[in-house]
Amino acid sequence: MAHIRTRETYGTRRLQTELAENGIIVGRDRLACLRKELRLRCKQKRKFRATTNPNHNLPVAPNLLNQTFAPTAPNQVWVADLTYVATQEGWLYLAGIKDVYTCEIVGYAMGERMTKELTGKALFMALRSQRPPAGLIHHSDRGSQYCAYDYRVIQEQFGLKTSMSRKGNCYDNAPMESFWGTLKNESLSHYRFNNRDEAISVIREYIEIFYNRQRRHSRLGNISPAAFREKYHQMAVLKKRTNGSVRYCQYTSHITSVQVAKFSVPLHLPLSPDKLTRTSKSIYRKQRAALFTRSFTT
């Protein structure tokens, strides 16, 4: 059943797209009526507290985004943050990095302590998997884990631009806060973990299998982040080939026009020797050869 397969997270719009791809065409109003009759509801969102502490003496980077999350390609803007998950064994801390353009979680790490090493592991995972160009903006809050010297050194080595939210303003890092809410609403809030390993397994499966590869995003045209990234790369290759063909056509057109202007044969010679005698054909060929030779040598 589509409602169960999508983990009870889709409204009528995304559910309609999911059914259509499986050959079932149904209107949104009809879907709404069926959901009401069957008492099917989406999981409700919950609010969660901030986890990082901005009260420290470490240097803080300026806010380069100012809540303008509008990249035009993958690996232009990453947002990073930390959150925590309760287990019977104790807290599990999760560091994540999200590509704002594709909505994909490109790096994450989990551990028992909320340290700079944890955020560093998430950053290295993102760098290894994406290999971003220099100039990428890395945005985070002012937590000490992101302001730490070691973390900033990694950013500088890979040519990343550091950006940080204003103190106490969660909206400055809205894309990452949105992901935490989605993760906890659609998955974590429905479990009681006996230990950290159970939580790690559920989180890893949610991110790598469901969220990145299956979950439809309205902002992406109701396709998954992985499908959106693949579509972007396909369009980029097609655009490159098209531009190359256009440039080649323009180049050959220019060369042809130059050749026509420089090496054109006088019109008093017949265009075809079909109706000429054998002697006339010989003269005709010699005259054209002489004209072309003269044209190339002048």
Image (cartoon, rainbow, N blue to C red):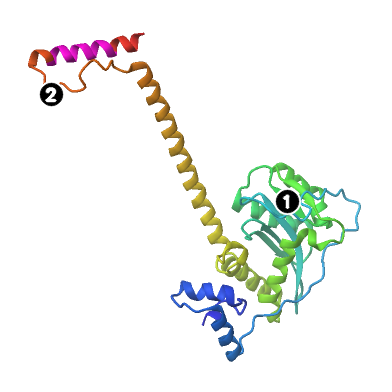
Q: Which residue is mark 1?
A: 138
Q: Secondary structure at mark 1?
A: strand
x, y percentage for residue 80? 73, 58
Q: Residue at x 56, y 56 (%)?
A: 229
Q: Is residue 106 above or below residue 216?
A: above
Q: Residue at x 39, y 24 (%)?
A: 257
The quadrant where residue 95 appears: bottom right
Q: Depth check: 228 or 142 in front?
A: 228
295 vs 202, left or right, is: left
x, y percentage for residue 35? 58, 86
Asked whether residue 187 is in view, the answer is no
Asked if the magenta segment contains residue 286, the reply would be yes
Q: How many marks?
A: 2
Q: Depth check: 221 or 185 in front?
A: 221
Which kind of residue does numbered mark 2 sit on? Answer: Asp
Q: Residue at x 67, y 57 (%)?
A: 100
173 vs 245, left or right, is: right
x, y percentage for residue 78? 69, 54
Asked whether residue 232 is in view, the answer is yes
The Cα–Cα distance between marks 2 and 1, rounded to whole angstroms, is 73 Å
Assign the C terminus to one quadrant of the image.
top left
Q: Which residues are magenta?
A: 281-292
Which kind of residue does numbered mark 1 sit on? Answer: His
Residue mark closest to the camera, 2 vs 1: 2
Q: Secondary structure at mark 2?
A: loop
Asked if the magenta segment contains residue 202, the reply would be no
Majority secondary structure in the magenta region: helix
> In the drawing, what numbered circle is on residue 274?
2
x, y percentage for residue 94? 72, 65
